[in-house]
């Protein structure tokens, strides 16, 4: 299954930006209702977030695929081992994109990439917790990942802030990451709405919206307020940006 019509590649160097919502929710019904709201607002890709997968297994992915038959779905299991098997399970459930961690053994990354090629799913490599984030991004590209997720983790951000330090932000090194690789980049982890919308201007065309923008980071539930209205405005701004060069 290869549902990727929302990502337009021109001459292998230019992409139209897409908006992805991270469904970091623990209940399938709530994930489906939030996804429907996001699609009405103009979101392009859906993500079965790690909390949803942990809480519901592949049932959450299958439910999303059943309701949104033509929408790209990212399964964010954060694979660390059993690369081929996990990629196959996610692909059979309806995922079009799977996530493997840079900190996994190189054989695991190789297996996920190989499975992706054979099963028709795209592989997103995540540089979370890499000692050198730029080197981690380059390594993921060298291993054959189709996308790089430049990711500052939830616990890392909170721990540093609680200790009185300056909370790290993906924007800190985003331009370095983009310059270091030739695959599309996505910035994840504690972004404000303004920062998320600005990522295409850094050469990172995959805009992801999750906690705390649309998901309550403390409860893993849909945030309160006019989320649909906010999402619609975000989508309009991102889509209006135009083509993004990734060379």
Image (spheres, rainbow, N blue to C red):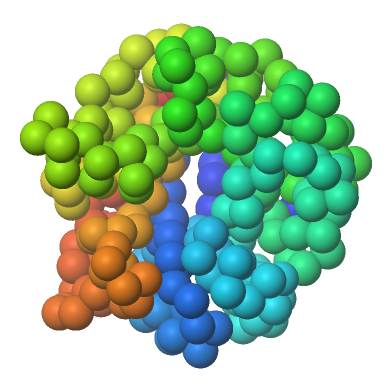
Name the outermost residue toward the bottom: 29
Pinpoint residue 124: horizontal percent, then vertical percent: 60, 38
**Is 120 placed left or right of 96 in the picture?**
right
Pinpoint residue 121: horizontal percent, then vertical percent: 75, 47
Up/down of 123 relative to 234, above or below: above
Name the outermost residue toward the right: 118
Residue at image point 42% right, 42% down = 206
- Regarding residue 26, the answer to whether it shows in the image is yes
Residue at image point 82% right, 44% down = 82
Pinpoint residue 127: horizontal percent, then vertical percent: 50, 28
Name the outermost residue toward the front: 163
Quarter where residue 95 is shown? bottom right
Out of 94 and 237, give the one closest to the viewer: 94
Pinpoint residue 197: horizontal percent, then vertical percent: 23, 45
- Regarding residue 4, the answer to whether it shows in the image is no
Quarter where residue 118 is shown? top right
Residue at image point 74% right, 66% down = 94
Out of 214 and 200, give the one closest to the viewer: 214
Where the N terminus falls, by quadrant? bottom right
**Is 10 placed left or right of 176 in the picture?**
right
Out of 135 and 97, give the one closest to the viewer: 135
Residue at image point 15% right, 37% down = 163
How many numbered marks appear? 0
Up/down of 81 relative to 10, above or below: below
């Amino acid at each position: 299954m290869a549902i990727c019509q929302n990502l337009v590649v021109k001459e292998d160097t230019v992409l139209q930006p897409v908006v992805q919502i991270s469904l970091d929710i623990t209940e399938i019904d709530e994930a489906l209702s939030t996804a429907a709201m996001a699609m009405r607002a103009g979101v392009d890709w859906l993500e079965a977030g790690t909390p949803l997968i942990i809480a519901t297994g592949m049932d959450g992915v299958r439910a999303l695929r059943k309701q949104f038959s033509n929408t790209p779905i990212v399964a964010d299991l954060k694979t660390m081992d059993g690369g081929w098997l996990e990629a196959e399970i996610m692909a059979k459930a309806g995922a079009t994109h799977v996530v493997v961690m840079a900190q996994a053994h190189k054989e695991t990354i190789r297996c996920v990439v190989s499975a992706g090629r054979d099963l028709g799913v795209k592989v997103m490599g995540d540089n979370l917790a890499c000692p050198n984030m730029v080197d981690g991004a380059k390594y993921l590209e060298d291993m054959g990942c189709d996308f790089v997720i430049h990711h500052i983790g939830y616990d890392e951000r909170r721990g540093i802030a609680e200790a009185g330090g300056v909370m790290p932000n993906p924007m800190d090194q985003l331009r370095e990451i983009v310059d270091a690789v030739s695959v599309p980049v996505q910035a994840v982890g504690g972004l404000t709405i303004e920062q998320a919308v600005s990522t295409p201007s850094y050469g990172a065309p995959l805009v992801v919206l999750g906690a705390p923008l649309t998901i309550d980071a403390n409860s893993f539930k849909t945030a309160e307020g006019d989320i649909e209205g906010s999402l619609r405005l975000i989508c309009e701004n991102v889509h209006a940006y135009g083509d993004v060069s990734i060379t």
